[in-house]
Amino acid sequence: MAAFQHPVVNLENKQVGTVDLLPEVFKLEDVNQHLIWEAVRHFLAKRRQGTAKTKDRWEVRGSGKKLLKQKGTGRARVGSVRSPLWRHGGTTHGPDPRNHDYAFPKKARRAALRNALSVKFAKGQVLVVENWEVETHKTKALAGTLGRIGVTGSALLVGTEASEKVQLAAANNIKVKTIESLGVNVFDLLKFDQVVFSREAVLALQEVVKP
């Protein structure tokens, strides 16, 4: 399919050109919602620490002495103070450290990105700016710049690795996140209200995820 042109603005919200985008990346007609869900599930599973741990009966502190004789007391049989039945005893079938990551094919990840980008584009939540060259690293100044280009809610700023000032300005704003062009993921695309690409970033991402 032939590429279509999308406007590119500068940080003063004046159009300075266009960029050629691929409809098979930004204008999918049949969006696979399940694939998007699976990509988010994989992202959340991959970033889990997996450090939950409880001690079983062989790891808790306590003597190994048999507390009561086996027969004749009228009480239940007790073999160890570390039994899970006793207070301060071990935990039965408790969690152990583990890796929650699982295999998710590269083709599926890229397809999920195309679907998520198409959803954002259809809602008019994709902007492209010429570059991220700002004059100051002040948080308030960046908020004003985003307001001028039409960003009203939370925003994902893509392609900011070349601008340290933007990264510093966004660090104190919980509604703004900066990310490099090839670090875009489905979770962040859906989490933030709008996605603002630099021209180079959107072309680089498009080249990677295109079918």
Image: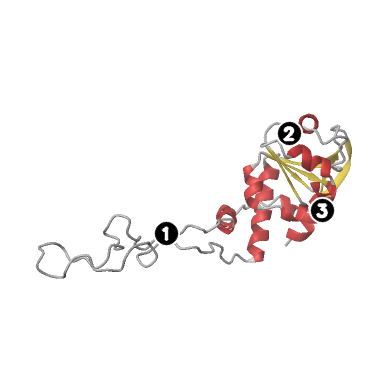
Q: Which residue is mark 2?
A: 151
Quarter of the image for residue 7 reads top right
Name the quarter where the C terminus is drawn: bottom right
Instruction: Give the foreground label among 1 and 3.
Output: 1
Name the quarter where the N terminus is drawn: bottom right
In the rendered image of this protein, does residue 36 appear above or below residue 124? Answer: below
Label 3 sits on what residue type? Leu
Q: How far apart, in angstroms, are the residues tagged by discs 1 and 3?
A: 48 Å
The furthest residue to the bottom: 70
Checking the image for residue 54, the label placed there is: 1
> Marks 3 and 1: in contact by CB < 8 Å?
no
Left or right of residue 7, residue 51 in this image: left
Image coordinates for residue 48, horizontal then vertical, percent: 55, 56
Q: Which residue is mark 3?
A: 203
Label 1 sits on what residue type? Thr
**Which residue is drawn at the image coordinates 51% and 58% (left, top)?**
51
Q: Please tell me which of labels 3 and 2 falls first in the chain.
A: 2
